[in-house]
Image (cartoon, helix red, strand yellow):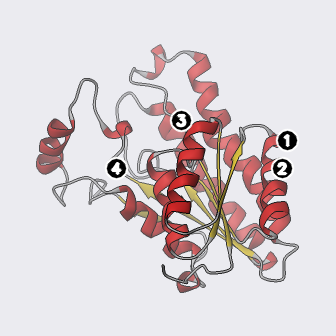
Amino acid sequence: MSTRFSGRTALVTGAGSGIGRAIALAFAAEGAQVVVAGRRRDPLDETVALIEGLGGKALAVTADVSRAADADALVAATVDHFGSLDVAVNNAGIFRGGQPLADLPEADWRTQLDINVSGVFLALQAQIRRMRTQSSGGAIVNLSSTFGLHKTVAGATAYSTSKAAVTALSRGAALDHIRDGVRINVVSPGATDTPMSLGPGETVAGRTERAKATLPLGRISATGEVAAAVLYLASDDAASVVGTDLVVDSGGSL
């Protein structure tokens, strides 16, 4: 195990699967104590078991970050268990769409804004309030998407709007709180090896062929590659990187 995050506590939301789980495992592999959060307990317990299998320490906390009380309680549980909150990764998000904007149910619009935008806002508030009391401050990385500021995709307008808002929110918060010792950045993944990157009825083999034809790199990103970008921004290697939006998308938004 590496020691880049030895002695530090990292909180990862949406850590029950996919990119969130890969991020949590990557922090554990580099020495962090990891708190994994999400709305369903069983997937979180699976992530904890994987971390403990690496010889790491982890805690699962169920939380809905679109609720202020849950966001506050999540930070409190992290500090109560491990003593500090040094890194936070706000990865929890949801996609609802696939149809033109005029046909999108209002409930799907509101759900995406509640979780993808308000969830990040409330999580940031709770995390920053803790981090600015610590002499060591902290680092926060928010997960956005190439959908939004970097790319427009039919049938994903609401999702793209929410993710563009995450980047704008993150950059504003970065400016507001860097003098508090809290450093905030963004990672924007493109197509990544998760079920979300599969088209309707598409197989993994079909996705592979599509990526060969459409992405400059010729393949989608691995979840570990997105995790590596997150860990870089959270690490001391990126100590002077503030408010950036790091795109990891196999060149898809070029």
The reply to whether the C-beta atoms of the residues labelled 2 and 1 are less than 8 Å apart is yes
Secondary structure state at the residue bearing disc 3: loop
Marks 3/4: CA–CA distance: 15 Å
Marks 3/1: CA–CA distance: 20 Å
Marks 4/1: CA–CA distance: 32 Å
Asked whether 217 or 43 is in front, the reply is 43
Secondary structure state at the residue bearing disc 4: loop
Name the mark on residue 69.
1
Task: Say which residue appears at 55% left-offset and 84% top-offset.
Answer: 3
Task: Say which residue appears at 55% left-offset and 83% top-offset.
Answer: 4
Name the mark on residue 192.
4
Q: Give x and y (percent) for residue 214.
A: 16, 47
Marks 3 and 1, the one that precedes in the sequence: 1
The residue at which mark 3 appears reads as: 94
Marks 2 and 4, the one that precedes in the sequence: 2
Marks 3 and 4, the one that precedes in the sequence: 3
Q: Which residue type carries mark 4?
A: Thr
The residue at which mark 2 appears reads as: 72
Marks 2 and 3, the one that precedes in the sequence: 2
Q: Which residue type carries mark 1?
A: Ala
The reply to whether the C-beta atoms of the residues labelled 2 and 4 are less than 8 Å apart is no
In the image, taking residue 154 as reference, residue 245 lies left or right, namely: right
- The quadrant in which residue 93 appears is top right
Q: How many marks?
A: 4
Secondary structure state at the residue bearing disc 1: helix
The reply to whether the C-beta atoms of the residues labelled 4 and 1 are less than 8 Å apart is no
Marks 4 and 1, the one that precedes in the sequence: 1
Task: Say which residue appears at 36% left-offset and 37% top-offset.
Answer: 195
Q: Residues within 10 Å of mark 2 (few under 14, many from 20)?
A: many
Asked whether 235 or 185 is in front, the reply is 235
251 versus 161 height, above or below: below
